Amino acid sequence: MESAAGPAAVLGGGPAGITAGYLLAKQSRPSVLFEADDVVGGLARTVVRDGYRFDLGGHRFFTKSHEVEALWREVLGAELLTRPRLSRIRWRGRFIEYPLQAGDVVRKLGPLELARCSGSYAAASLRRRREAESFEDWVTARFGRRLFELFFRTYTEKVWGVPTGELRAEWAAQRIRDLSFGRAARAAMLGDGGGVRSLIEEFLYPRLGPGQMWDTMLAELVRMGGEARLGTPVTRLTHAGGRITSVGTADGAALEPGPVISSLPLGAVVEMLDPAPPSHVLQAARGLRYRDFLTVALVIRGEDPFPDTWIYVHDPEVRVGRIQNFRAWSPWMVPHRERSCVGLEYFCFEGDELWSSPDEDLIERATAELARIGLATGDRVERGWVVRVPKAYPIYDSAYGARVAAIRNWLERLGNLQQVGRNGLHRYNNSDHSMLTAIRAVENASAGTSHDIWAVNTDSVYHEEDVADEHPYREAPRTPASAQGAAAR
């Protein structure tokens, strides 16, 4: 990557951006991080209300990248806990263990439905697979039409707000654990064990939620001499001679940068360019679509309403898509022993009826839906808060690939600009993948390497089989003795 004398500019303070800023500061490289919000972490931040801590979506710290895990441990050390995983699917009024367990599926589906699923699965396995274009085609070819209709269609359309035939197969290949889900389904239906040694039953998690990771990185970044400008949206990217020459912000300031590492939404970056790129690039940027969501966090009197870390809600009669139990993630997330805190996630589009509903109406809806699915009666809900998250998930629609390619091809002429992270690449990466893109971008900027950032996570490998160790996080640092008492709260 082309180098220059100016300080590195890091645009955006989500997991990718804060990682890049931290690593640059660690190298004593002059850098400035710009973040529009007053906090870092983006979608992966931890929100705190009256002592209650909750995620915007659940963020497990699980990775197959040794570099990323080493960085996690470097930053948090003993504050990184090993937590047990328990998750289930709420389906037709029943709770089914996820990943699928043979005995549980047999009991919950019943012999007739199990026979239908088995036949459909077997037929799909015998067919020659053609190249799938849509999510629906991809899943049906691997798991059969019956399993698709029962376990995939309703939840997927609830999450994305579009028919499964409009979602591209790339999203399915990237996000669905083909081997682990397929083997588990086979084990459930055919009773052969599926050939899986162990699905991931533990994960790492910061004691005070994922925000603790990003807040600690920010503090270290500043301590090591880096600069962070929070509450400072980037509004203009001036370019000339094949490079970004100025980063302008909403307060009228401007920075002449060396390398620029951006995790800002891909389409937004195009709109900020001055001079503007060709019309076909602008049209591609404006055509990129996102799914937004909101979390309703409820404080509930008494014990936790369920033991799971999270529950997927497939039932179409309620709008909630997933429910988190924050104490199950870490006991330190909930400040009172006689209270629990859960987060109900609603997927929507910015500006639609759900997004625009008053907070009190959303809290009332969440309370009613929690009772409707039998987890907690309304009289146990003490209070709640609503947090809206725009541009949470890039949508893989039929045109996204061509649009991203057009944007990428034009941006690559700017020699000092690298896009990283989920929205920066318009790719549904997890936090570890986003951090890995930042690691590679910093190597390009500082060491002169030529990593293709766009190639990170394109192999679509997101399996959770335990190939090396049945308990990969068994040796995670233990919580200090001084913190043990707090866990009992």
Image (spheres, grey):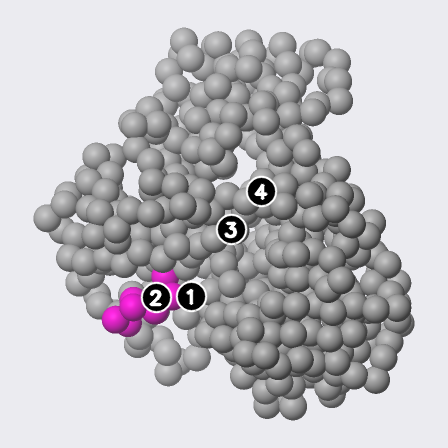
Label tally: 4
**Tag shown at residue 289:** 4
**Cα–Cα gap, marks 1 and 2:** 6 Å
Q: Is residue 58 visible?
A: no
Taking the spot 55% from the left edge, 44% from the top edge, the residue there is 290
Residue matched to label 2: 53
- Sequence-wise, which precedes: disc 1 or disc 4? 1
Image: 164 above or below 307: above
- Sequence-wise, which precedes: disc 2 or disc 3? 2
Residue matched to label 3: 392
What secondary structure is the stretch in magenta mostly built from? strand
Q: Residue 440: within the magenta?
A: no
**Tag shown at residue 46:** 1
- Identify which residue, 106 or 45, lies in the foreground: 45
Which quadrant of the figure contains the C terminus?
Answer: bottom left
Q: Residues within 10 Å of mark 4 (few under 14, many from 20)?
A: some
